Image (cartoon, helix red, strand yellow):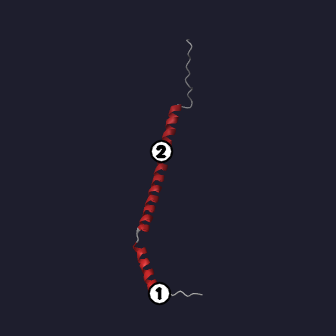
C-alpha cells in the first residue's frame, strides 16, 4: 500500500483560494436573480391574460346575444314569389 503525503499547508491554501473565488464569483447569484425576475414577470402576465381573457369572453358573449336578437322574436322570412 502506497502512502500519499499531502502538504497540509498547500492544501489549506488551495482550499482557501477556491473558497475566496467561490464567494467572489457573482455569476450564479445574477443567474438566480434573473430567474426570479422572469418567474415574477411570468406570473404577472398569466394573471393579466386570465383577467383579460374573461373580459374578452364576456364581450364576445354579449355580441353573440345581440346578434341573435330577443328570444321570443320569430325569425324574419323572405319570400321571392310575388304576392
> Where is 43 relative to 64, above or below?
below
Query: Residue at horizontal 49%, vertical 86%?
Result: 6
- Which quadrant is home to the N terminus? bottom right
Which of the two residues, 14 or 62, is positioned nearer the viewer here? 14
User: What label does residue 35 carry, if any?
Assistant: none
On the image, numbered disc 1 is attached to which residue?
Answer: 8
> Where is 78 relative to 58, above or below?
above
Q: Please identify the residue farthest to the front as the structure is shown.
A: 2
Q: Nearer the viewer, mark 1 or mark 2?
A: 1
On the image, numbered disc 2 is attached to which residue?
Answer: 55
Relative to residue 81, is residue 56 drawn left or right? left
| Residue 17: x %, y % from top left | 42, 79
- Which quadrant is home to the C terminus? top right
| Residue 42: x %, y % from top left | 46, 55
Which of the two residues, 18 or 27, is positioned nearer the viewer here? 18
Query: Residue at horizontal 55%, vertical 19%?
Result: 78
| Residue 5: x %, y % from top left | 51, 87
> Where is 31 relative to 46, above or below?
below
Relative to residue 74, is residue 26 drawn left or right? left
Relative to residue 24, is residue 58 drawn left or right? right
Mark 2 residue element: helix
Query: Residue at horizontal 49%, vertical 46%?
Result: 53
Amino acid at each position: 500500500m502506497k502512502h500519499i503525503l499531502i502538504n497540509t499547508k498547500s492544501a489549506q491554501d488551495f482550499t482557501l483560494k477556491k473558497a475566496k473565488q467561490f464567494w467572489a464569483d457573482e455569476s450564479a447569484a445574477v443567474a438566480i436573480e434573473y430567474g426570479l425576475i422572469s418567474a415574477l414577470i411570468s406570473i404577472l402576465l398569466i394573471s393579466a391574460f386570465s383577467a383579460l381573457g374573461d373580459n374578452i369572453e364576456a364581450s364576445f358573449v354579449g355580441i353573440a346575444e345581440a346578434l341573435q336578437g330577443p328570444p321570443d322574436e320569430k325569425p324574419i322570412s323572405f319570400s321571392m314569389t310575388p304576392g
